[in-house]
C-alpha cells in the first residue's frame, strides 16, 4: 500500500497559557492520500483552522503539536525552520479566508506569484514572471487588464482571492489547504472560486483539505469528510456514506442547521421554506471542556454514560467504501455491533 500524503495519529495541539496547558485539538487521527479531497467541517472554534495551521507549521506562538504528524512519511515536528521554508509553498500551500491578510500590500502581485518559483524552483526572473502571467491567466485574471505590476489594493476581494490561489498553486504543491476560501466573497463569486479550485486540483492531482461551513460544498467537492467538535473529530468517513447515514447527533444537527440539509428534508405540499434548526447552546471553550462527551450538554439523546467518559471514534458502518466512524455512545445509525 502506498503511504498517505498526510497522516495524523493521536495528534493534539497544546496551548500554554501561563502555567497552565490546554489541548486546543485532542487526539486527532486523520489521513489524506495523494489526490484525495478531504472536507473538514464543524462549528466555529472547533479547531479546524488550528488543524490546518499545524500541517503548515504556522501555529500561533505558545501552541505546539503532540503526537504524530507525518507528511509523505516525514515527521513535520522534526523539521527545522529552513526545512519548513522548503516545504511551505512547495509541498503544501494554503489559501486563507481573507486574502488581504496573506498578500503583501506593498509588493506587486506579479512579484508575489513569481517569488515561489524563484525561491523553490530556482527559476530566473524572466521565467518566473512568464509563469506568473500564465498563472494569472489560468485563475481568470488575463493580461493586459491584470498586469504583473498591479498591487493587491487595486483588486476586488474575489480577484485577490484568485491571486492567492495563483500563489498557492505556483509550485504545484502536493497538498492544497483552503480554509474558508470563499466566506468573504459574494455567492456568485464563491461558486466561481470553488469551481476554479476544483479545476486546478483536478489538473494537477493535488490533494485538497477544504475547511468550510458549507455542507453543500463539502458534499459536492470532497471524497471524505471529517466533522470536528470541541477539538476532536466526532464523525468521519466517505462523504457519500456520511451524508447518507449521519450518526453523531452533532453532525446531524449541523446538517439540519444548514440550508443544504434543511432543503433536503421532506416537505409536504403547500409547506413553506424549511426552517433551519439551530443547535442549542455553544461549543465549550478549550479551558472548560468536560472529561466526558463534550456534546452531552447540548445533546437531546445523551444518557448517563455520555457524562462519564469521552466516546472513542468507533467504527459504525463497514458497508461503505471506507470506514465510517463516529465518536458517540448512542449513534443514530449503527451498522456494526458495538
Ligand atoms: N492565537 C490563539 N491563541 C490562543 N487560542 C487560540 C488562538 N487561535 C485560536 N485559538 C483557540 O483555538 C480554538 C480553535 O480555534 P480554530 O481557529 O481552529 O477554530 P475554527 O474551527 O477554525 O473556527 P472558525 O470556524 O471560527 O474559523 C478556539 O477555542 C480558539 O479560541
Ligand atoms: Mg477557522
Image (cartoon, rainbow, N blue to C red):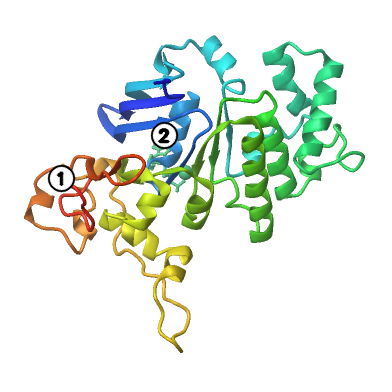
**Residue 90 visible somewhere in the drawing:** yes
Does residue 322 lie above or below 297 as drawn?
A: above
Look at the numbered disc 2 and give the secondary structure of its residue.
Answer: helix
Q: Circle 1: is it few (<14), some (14-19), or many (20+) Cα within 10 Å? A: some
Residue that label 2 marks: 51
Residue visible at 71% across and 49% down in the picture: 158
**From the Cβ of disc 2, is ligand 1 less than 8 Å away?**
yes
Where is 88 relative to 213, above or below? above
- Which residue corresponds to the image point at 33% horizontal and 21% vertical from the top-left? 68
Q: From the top left corner, tell me how far across and down residue 93 is, in percent.
A: 58, 28
- Residue 292's disc is 1
93 or 151, which is in the foreground? 93
- Is residue 59 visible in the rendered structure shown here? no
Q: CA gap, disc 1 to disc 2? A: 22 Å
Sequence-first disc among 1 and 2: 2
- Where does the image place residue 218, in percent across and percent down from the top left? 49, 50
For label 2, the crowd category at 10 Å Cα-Cα, with few meaning under 14, some 14 to 19 and many 20 or more, is many
Above or below, 179 against 262 in this view is: above
Amino acid at each position: 500500500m502506498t503511504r498517505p500524503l498526510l497522516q495524523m495519529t493521536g495528534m493534539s495541539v497544546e496551548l500554554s497559557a501561563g502555567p497552565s496547558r490546554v489541548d486546543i485539538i485532542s487526539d486527532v487521527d486523520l489521513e489524506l492520500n495523494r489526490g484525495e479531497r478531504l472536507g473538514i467541517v464543524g462549528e466555529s472554534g472547533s479547531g479546524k483552522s488550528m488543524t490546518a495551521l499545524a500541517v503548515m507549521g504556522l501555529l500561533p506562538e505558545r501552541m505546539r503539536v503532540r503526537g504524530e504528524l507525518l507528511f509523505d512519511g516525514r515527521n513535520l515536528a522534526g523539521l527545522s525552520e529552513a526545512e519548513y521554508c522548503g516545504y511551505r509553498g512547495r509541498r503544501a500551500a494554503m489559501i486563507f479566508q481573507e486574502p488581504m491578510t496573506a498578500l503583501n500590500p506593498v509588493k506587486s502581485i506579479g512579484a508575489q506569484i513569481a517569488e515561489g518559483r524563484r525561491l523553490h524552483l530556482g527559476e530566473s526572473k524572466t521565467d518566473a514572471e512568464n509563469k506568473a502571467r500564465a498563472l494569472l491567466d489560468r485563475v481568470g485574471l488575463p493580461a493586459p487588464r491584470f498586469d504583473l505590476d498591479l498591487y493587491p489594493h487595486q483588486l476586488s476581494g474575489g480577484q485577490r482571492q484568485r491571486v492567492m490561489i495563483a500563489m498557492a498553486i505556483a509550485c504545484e504543491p502536493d497538498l492544497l489547504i483552503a480554509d474558508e476560501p470563499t466566506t468573504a466573497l459574494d455567492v456568485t463569486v464563491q461558486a466561481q472560486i470553488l469551481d476554479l479550485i476544483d479545476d486546478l486540483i483536478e489538473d494537477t492531482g493535488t490533494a485538497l483539505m477544504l475547511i468550510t461551513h458549507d455542507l453543500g460544498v463539502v458534499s459536492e467537492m470532497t471524497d471524505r469528510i471529517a466533522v470536528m467538535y470541541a477539538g476532536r473529530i466526532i464523525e468521519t468517513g466517505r462523504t457519500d456514506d456520511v451524508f447518507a447515514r449521519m450518526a453523531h447527533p452533532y453532525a446531524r444537527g449541523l446538517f439540519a442547521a444548514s440550508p443544504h440539509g434543511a432543503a433536503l428534508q421532506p416537505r409536504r405540499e403547500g409547506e413553506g421554506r424549511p426552517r433551519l434548526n439551530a443547535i442549542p447552546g455553544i461549543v465549550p471553550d478549550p479551558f472548560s471542556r468536560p472529561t466526558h462527551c463534550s456534546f452531552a450538554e447540548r445533546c437531546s439523546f445523551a444518557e448517563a454514560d455520555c457524562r462519564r467518559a469521552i466516546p472513542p471514534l468507533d467504527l459504525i458502518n463497514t458497508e461503505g467504501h471506507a470506514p465510517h466512524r463516529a465518536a458517540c455512545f448512542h449513534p443514530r445509525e449503527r451498522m456494526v455491533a458495538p
